[in-house]
Amino acid sequence: MLVFCTGSATLAAALRNPISPTNIFAPASTPAHSIYRLSIFLLEVTGAIFVIVVSLLAYAVVKFRKRKHDDDSEPPQVYGSNQMELAWTVLPVLIVVVLFVSTAQVIHRVQDAQAPERAVRVTAVGHQFWWEYRYSQFGLVTANELHVPVSDSKNPTPTYLALLSADVDHTFWVPRLAGKTDLIPNHPNTMWIDPQETGLFLGQCGQYCGTQHAKMLLRVYVQSREDFDRWVREQQQPATSDPTVAAGQALFLAKACFACHTIRGTIAAGQVGPDLTHLMSRDTIASGALPNTPENLRQWVHNPNAIKPGSLMPVPDLTDEELGQVTAYLLTLH
Amino acid sequence: MASESIPMAIPKTSRGVVFEWLFTADHKKIGVMYIVYSLLFLVIMGIEAILMRIQLAHPHASFMSPQTFNRLFTLHGTTGVFFVAMPILFGFGNYLVPLMIGARDMAFPRLNAFSFWITAFGGLVLYASFFAGGGFLQGGSAPDVGWFAYAPLTSTTYSPGHSTDYWTLSILLAGVGSVGGAVNFIATILCMRCPGMTLSRMPLLAWMNLVMGGLVLVTISPLTAAQIMLMIDRYLSGHFFDTQAGGSVVMWMHFFWIFGHPEVYVLIIPCFAFVSEVIPVFSRKAMFGYPAMVAATVSIGFVSLGVWAHHMYTVGMPSYGNAFFVLTTMIVGVPTGIKIFNWLATMWGGKIRFATPMLFCVGFLFQFLIAGLTGIMLATAPFDWQLSNSYFVVAHFHYVIVGGILFTIFAAFYYWFPKMTGRMLNETLGKWHFWIMVIGFHLTFDFMHIPGLLGMPRRVYTYEPGRGWETWNLISSIGVIFQAAAILIFVYNMIQSYFKGAPAGSDPWDAWTLEWATTSPPPDYNFAAIPEVRSRRPLWDIKHPEDPDWKYE
């Protein structure tokens, strides 16, 4: 099994072929790389131990079985051997020392890294069952889809995340970018990533946080510096105000929606649910659970519980016509 | 030296039999009750596992709601640790320890009965939750916070109603039972050994239950304290874990895992005991390195108290804190590895008979080695930053619990069922049981490591397609069919053999420890005359008067 593991890790690395978008053996960022290199070393050591011990076991099982022609005399009784027992105590202790030293180095390198001046800083707040992202450097707040700039290893621009929680424990886990770190109420944590290739990186919440833990998905968009800067400028704008959907906007502000959601540029300033100012700039809704299409949006607003049972968004009190108007309004929030 | 039991002339009424078992303080009957109780809950938790694996066989399956799934994994884990593994090991320990040390019963027979009944009651409290609230088919008010119930998910804010309370109370009750059992083991082993049986001559099973007892005493206290603090938070306006009022969520984790990690050693150490009794007898050799085995067990007991925060590497402890726990966790692997070498060395040069108990022990050796090595991987904090809370961890601990603990429990059944009932279990059925279990176990749990390596977290009622997890989940689910079949064969074997098995006699395996020196089953008083011993293998000395153990060690 371990040989299989080592084999598959090497294969994954060699092929660079996406067996999985969340493969821990396909690192794309320094913390994930450091973990990957340590884990390969570990797999080699444990793999060697496995091969040696299992060979001895297999040999013993074959060579020392009672044969049919054996009489019933007992074999020589060997009570112990001080030399052997010393050897197989000292050797494991040495292996432990080597593994510990290599591990301690990686722990220090990842956990104690200092943020450079040009690092992008984001505060991630875990909620049941969605992610809030606050970029105080840029004065913008968004939800569920994290955008970060790509980092050049010669001139790194890492992103440092401060991790907070608004309710229970959550965990931020995007395997190709870094190991996981918990979001614990009243216990701020930090982590960092410096993705070296652009693209979309997937993950999900890694700490059981209630009914919809399984659908608290993560999407990290790594963009070139120009694309990231453009995205920031777009997100900094207040919400568009399209007069053709005024009816929907009025409903949004009159019904319960504004109490939980923020739409900058309107009076809606709720903190309980995701910021919707630029809802239509996102590929997904419901924390990655659904593609962001008009039909899905309408279904979600109509009855969140039918899609994500246990979601904390209450069913809005809207007639069919009102539902159409609110959806039309939301669809203008680019 | 085999003693004959004196036939009883008093006829038994069925009311008499029921009362005899309800009010017994005899360690053998209490042991059997613990074991039967655990087997019932083993079947129940197996059904819970089957249901969950059906849901996980395909992505976005709708076999059950998320609420039901979350209750199932909570019940499955809680039942497995507290109402299957602990009671079955206490059961075997209770049955065997007095017999193996030449005593007539445990030191405190009534405490023994009390410990069983309060543990049993705890299990009933936990399962009563299924019938409360919305009723059985909707999962009732069963707890859904996971078996380690992290705060603040367990606060009244996030877990309103009483579901969490069923969890808290049932564990409190089980903990009381465990402490009573541990006190009994320690007192019995330290005070009631027969003449000539110094500590260094007692069977390894006695040593291991002694260490286990000591560990239980240390480890249950923080668990009980945590349950009480949780109840105070929920009902008496406490704020131990309320972060809005100065409480700490991380403190729950520390309290739970200071219990939770030594607990897994509480579970595995008696299993080491079974292996240490079976491998020598079926290899026809004395245990290799008895003093090292004792020293290794005692050091595991101590070191295991200092490793708990390896369950908390992702919580945000400082780097030197994480490094400390990496070191202690790796160190505890050393005495564990030593034991594997000692068992191998016992087999080396022997004449191995592959009867069913030995088959399960060889399976254990192979699987426990793998589990230990994946444990070393998890001990390395950075690797754990990826693997923690993923299906790799689930695969690892099931490898230990099913591949290690359950396999040795099967070995113990096949080995000591003859002593307990006077009849042999069927060897052919035993081999079918073993091989089908091996196939099912490896199908489910080998391939379960892979989704973990590919980013699948645990405790998810469903998962996304396109992440490379589907095939492995399907294979894991298929393996469950084989495991269920193996367990059914086992249950059938036990029932059939109880009534129609071949008579065992007092010593069917040609073994060497004192329990084989009395009839099968033993009389109430165990031995007609208290034995006197001169070595670690009193029956070997009798069977080989020209070559007794006491000449050599």
Image (cartoon, coloured by chain):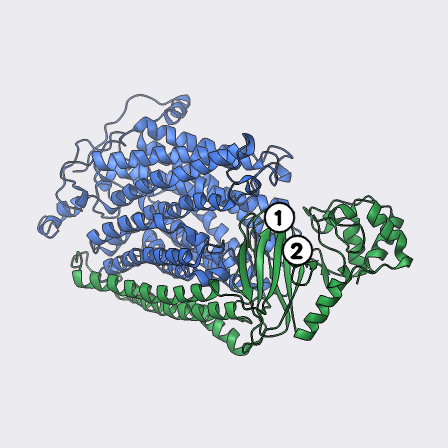
Which mark is first along the chain, 2 or 1? 2
Query: Which residue occupies the foreground of this view, B435 or B81?
Result: B81
Give the image location of residue B311, x and y in percent: 45, 52
Chain bearing tag 1 is A
Chain bearing tag 2 is A
Q: Label 2 belongs to which residue?
A: A132
Residue B54, visible in the rendered structure:
no
Give the image location of residue A232, x and y in percent: 71, 66
Q: Secondary structure at mark 2?
A: strand
Residue B259, visible in the rendered structure:
yes
Q: Colour of chain A?
A: green
Q: CA separation, marks 1 and 2?
A: 10 Å
Query: Which residue occupies the foreground of this view, A268 or B394?
Result: A268
Specify whether A246 is left or right of A18. right
Q: Colour of chain B?
A: blue
- Which numbered disc covers residue A166? 1
Give the image location of residue B422, x and y in percent: 31, 39
Q: Amino acid at mark 2?
A: Glu
Q: Amino acid at mark 1?
A: Ala
Residue at point 50% right, 65% down?
Answer: A114
